[in-house]
Image (cartoon, coloured by chain):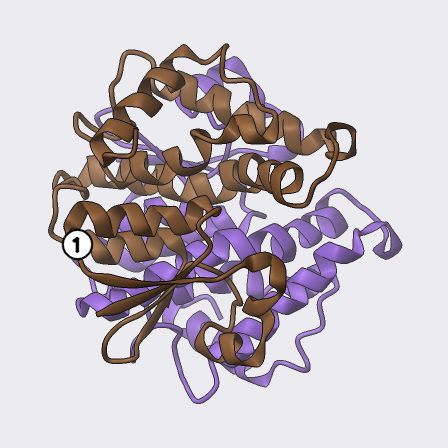
Chain colours: A purple, B brown
Amino acid sequence: MLTVYGDHRSGNCLKVRWMLDRLGRDYRWVETDVLTGVTRTPEFLARNPAGQVPTVVFDDGRVLAQSNAILLHLAEGTDWIPTDPFIRAQMFEWLFWEQYSHEPYIAVVRFQRLLAGMAPDEIEPRLIQRGYAALDRMEGGLAGRNWLAGEAVSLADLALVAYTRVAGEGGFDLVPYPAVRAWIARVEAALGIS
Amino acid sequence: MLTVYGDHRSGNCLKVRWMLDRLGRDYRWVETDVLTGVTRTPEFLARNPAGQVPTVVFDDGRVLAQSNAILLHLAEGTDWIPTDPFIRAQMFEWLFWEQYSHEPYIAVVRFQRLLAGMAPDEIEPRLIQRGYAALDRMEGGLAGRNWLAGEAVSLADLALVAYTRVAGEGGFDLVPYPAVRAWIARVEAALGIS
């Protein structure tokens, strides 16, 4: 049985849990509170030198990190990865965009507000501005579409919904984003987490 | 013939050029100077709403962005993507790690020093510290190994070498990183860019 080291408040970790649940896989979840410094201990760093969660350890001891890499591995051969090469490439585009242009703003601001207890005026304005730019990009990308890549739910939707659905916890206002809000509801229904 | 909109000073753009060259593909390179604001024009944003290079436009007008997504699409079915599922997952882990934990520090500091003309003491210390943390992670990952994922060169090496080989232009000292330096030479040789 594989083991997931994850923090239940982290969208990156929940991605992995949702995927395992949807695939009906057994797993062991080891709650790993990132605020305690446990991911910086020698024991944890021996497992994952990047000191990040989620970290997955397979039966044979092999270790995999990076939420979207874990998703791609778990979902191999399933409908969560489009078979059409170009639609699959678009899914990859969203997955990399998520880690570069969305998570560092939407998730980081939420972390600062919700977990680090920072006040609204303590948040770097650049982070908020770029978070809204990411939401703008998603609203445009979802115009007239149900899903981010192709005509079916894919890992792109699973990965992007993780922090988008809780953007409000970072103070982001989703009211001006009707396409994003409708999409969140669709993806949550597809994941059985609504 | 596909068209690449790219800035020749950008490692993310060079990744795409190197891949096309290694695969012997024809392409049109449209030099796109990111410092001029051309990627923020309505014309460019109509092509890629994220306003980023590299952006690839295929013969049929379809557009793909995000350097690592472009690499995965171009390299599909070639030796640059490992066939073993777990080694392929490790390649993905490095590709996502590159965009999240390496590029935002190594490449950003280089951009600030080399292209934005900032002095060493104008660089945010946190960026330098995290850049060195990324180099530490690579040095550890390359201990006793020739390549990042598995026993052959892969997209993980191509993607990571792009900014690692020019880290010195951002002021990073690679002398304490012998495994990284030896790996850079190996990857450059594999790419024919040494």
Residue A70 falls in image quadrant: top left
Badge 1: chain ID: B
- The residue that appears at 50% across and 43% down in the rendered structure is B100
Residue A25 shows in the view: no
Residue B189 appears at what percent x and percent y?
24, 27
Q: Give the residue furthest to the bottom.
A: A144
Q: Secondary structure at mark 1?
A: loop
Looking at the picture, which amino acid does disc 1 mark? Glu
Residue B70 appears at what percent x and percent y?
31, 57
In the foreground, B74 or B34: B34
Q: According to the image, label 1 marks what residue?
A: B76
- The residue that appears at 21% across and 37% down in the rendered structure is B86
Vertical side of B18 occupied by B28: above or below = below
A52 left or right, relative to A192: right
Residue B79 falls in image quadrant: top left
Residue A109 appears at what percent x and percent y?
70, 53
In the rendered image, which quarter contains the C terminus of chain B?
top left
- The residue that appears at 52% across and 75% down in the rendered structure is B45
Vertical side of B145 occupied by A39: above or below = below
In the foreground, B116 or A71: B116
Q: Residues within 10 Å of mark 1 (few under 14, many from 20)?
A: few
Residue A134 shows in the view: yes
- The residue that appears at 54% across and 46% down in the rendered structure is A8
Vertical side of A81 occupied by B145: above or below = above
Number of marks present in the image shown: 1
Residue B136 appears at what percent x and percent y?
49, 19
